[in-house]
Image: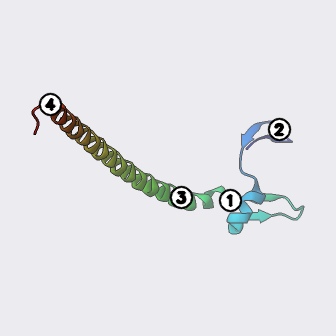
Amino acid sequence: MSFNWKDSGRTSIGLIAQDVEKIFPEIVSTDEAGIKSVDYAKLIAPLIEAIKEQQSQIEELKLEIEELKLKIRQSNWQGKFLWKKQKTIKNYSLQPDAF
């Protein structure tokens, strides 16, 4: 989220500490005034692991997509084969001296 510092008016970005606290309570601290803060350095390891997990899921999905493309190509090939076979049978049966 984007916010402006009260003392300087400077714009900055950050996370909502209460949201982070729900997932990683150990990286959120609360001062005497009840102000919460996030230790961003401690977020690096979980973020890297999340990226690794997402990359693994992406690779699995890419493989699944390729498998589905292959099935579609095979299905299209089978459909064309059956269509040609059916057309050949119709043409053969339409010939007057077929039998």
User: What residue does disc 1 label?
Assistant: 39
Q: Position of residue 51 (x, y in %)?
A: 50, 55
Quadrant of res 80: top left
The disc, 2 or 1, on the residue closer to the chain's N-terminal end is: 2
Distance, label 3 to label 1, CA atoms, is 18 Å
| Residue type indicated by callout 3 | Ala
Quarter the C terminus occupies? top left
User: What residue does disc 3 label?
Assistant: 50
| Residue type indicated by callout 1 | Asp
Q: Position of residue 29 (x, y in %)?
A: 76, 64
User: What residue does disc 2 label?
Assistant: 8
Identify the secondary structure beneath mark 2.
loop
Counting every numbered tag in the picture gives 4
Q: Nearer the viewer, residue 59 or 17?
A: 59
Distance, label 2 to label 1, CA atoms, is 21 Å
Q: Nearer the viewer, residue 9 or 88?
A: 88
